[in-house]
Structure formats: structure tokens, C-alpha cells
Amino acid sequence: MLWSEHKYAPWYLYSMAFIESIFWPVPVDIMLAPMALSKPHLAWRFAFWSTVFSVLGGAVGYYLGYFLYDPVVLPFIEMMGYQDKMLTAESWFGQWGILVIFIASFTPIPFKVFTVSAGMMGMVFAPFLLTALVGRGLRFFLVAGLMVLGGKKMEAKLSQYIDILGWGTIIAAIILYLILKY
């Protein structure tokens, strides 16, 4: 908690939100939650700017996938061992389209894989950006709101159940998709 009160902590958070959408493996929530707890009066600002920087990072990831997939991104994916995740992302895009961006932006699925994949597959940019904005905004404002409303007790519970909440959201989204499609 002490580091979340550092005077440059917001800039670390926003930088992390930006690079997490491209390549960084640590979720923004790890830093956003304690910052919202330590400074609840700034929680909404942290959530807003985390959303903005995450979506900007997502746009960079998209353009990396669109313009530089073979020479730059593919070697990095191989180095990081993300080949299977990229194949899964491609398959999901083919099956569910833009809904995949919402799911990836709102849940624990690695968002970066889907930002790059969206560019590589030539997804239309405006719907990609809008969907990422909605998904990331919902996620970060939910985290900030839960921390403000629940305080320290909520932090402990959220840490305990974060994976269940994330996967539950994915399952609910898939069920909703299947209901709407069929």
C-alpha cells in the first residue's frame, strides 16, 4: 500500500495501463485497486485515466498487429511463448467477432493478445476502439468503485475471488452470445 501513495504512482499506473495493452503481463487492477483504496477521493480519476491510457495502448497494439505483425510482433510472440494464445485469439475472432474485444477488455483474458490480433486480422478500427473503451472503462470503474465502497474488506474479498469473477463473466458472455445467436 505504501507504494500506491508515492507521488508518481498515478503516472506509474497510467504507464502500466498503456503498456499492459501491448505487452506487459501484469494487470492494471493490481495497481489500481490499492491506489483507489489509499486515495478514495481520487479513485474515479485513476479509473478514468487508466481507461484512457489502456485504450491508447490498445490502439498501439492494434497498429502493431496491422502494420508490423510479421517483422516485429511475431518474433516477440514466439519469444514470450504466446503462440497458443494467438491461435486461440484468431479462432475466437472468427467465431465471435467484436464480442471478443469486449470480453478481453473486461475479463482477465490477456487484452494485449486481442489488441494485436484485431490489427493483424484487419478488424475495423472504430468499433474496436469503442468496444475496448466500454470494456476497459467498465472494468476499471468497477474495480475503483468496489474499492471505494468496500474499503479494506473488499480488497481482501476481491483478491480471493478475482479469478472466479473473471471466468464467471466470460461464461455469462458466452451464454448471452449463444442465446442471442440461436
Image: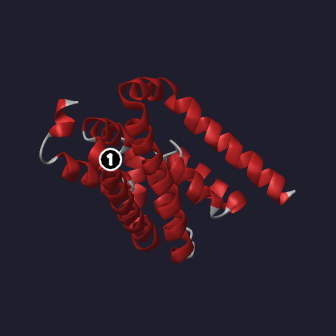
Q: Does 53 sit above or below residue 147?
A: below
Q: What residue is shown with label 1?
A: 43
Q: Nearer the viewer, residue 58 or 42?
A: 42
Q: Does 157 sit above or below residue 61?
A: above
Q: Residue at x 25, y 36 (%)?
A: 38
Number of labelled discs?
1
The kind of residue tagged 1 is Ala
Q: Which class describes the residues within 10 Å of circle 1: few (<14), some (14-19), or many (20+)?
A: many
Q: Residue furthest right?
A: 182
Q: Position of residue 162 (x, y in %)?
A: 50, 31
**Quadrant of the rendered structure where residue 34 is?**
top left
Is residue 176 toward the left or the right of residue 54 in the image? right
Q: Position of residue 163 (x, y in %)?
A: 53, 31
Q: Residue at x 49, y 69 (%)?
A: 129
Q: Does 127 sit above or below residue 163?
A: below
Decide if residue 117 is in sight here: no
Q: The N terminus lies in which quarter of the figure? A: top left
Q: Residue at x 33, y 43 (%)?
A: 32
Q: Nearer the viewer, residue 103 or 88?
A: 103
**Quadrant of the rendered structure where residue 31 is?**
top left
Is residue 90 toward the left or the right of residue 160 in the image? right
Q: Position of residue 75 (x, y in %)?
A: 38, 55
Q: Position of residue 151 (x, y in %)?
A: 37, 30
Q: Residue furthest left?
A: 7
Q: The C terminus lies in which quarter of the figure? A: bottom right
Q: Nearer the viewer, residue 81 or 8?
A: 8
Q: Nearer the viewer, residue 160 or 182?
A: 160
- Circle 1: element type: helix
Decide if residue 85 is in sight here: yes
Q: Residue at x 35, y 38 (%)?
A: 33
Which colour assignment does the render follow? secondary structure
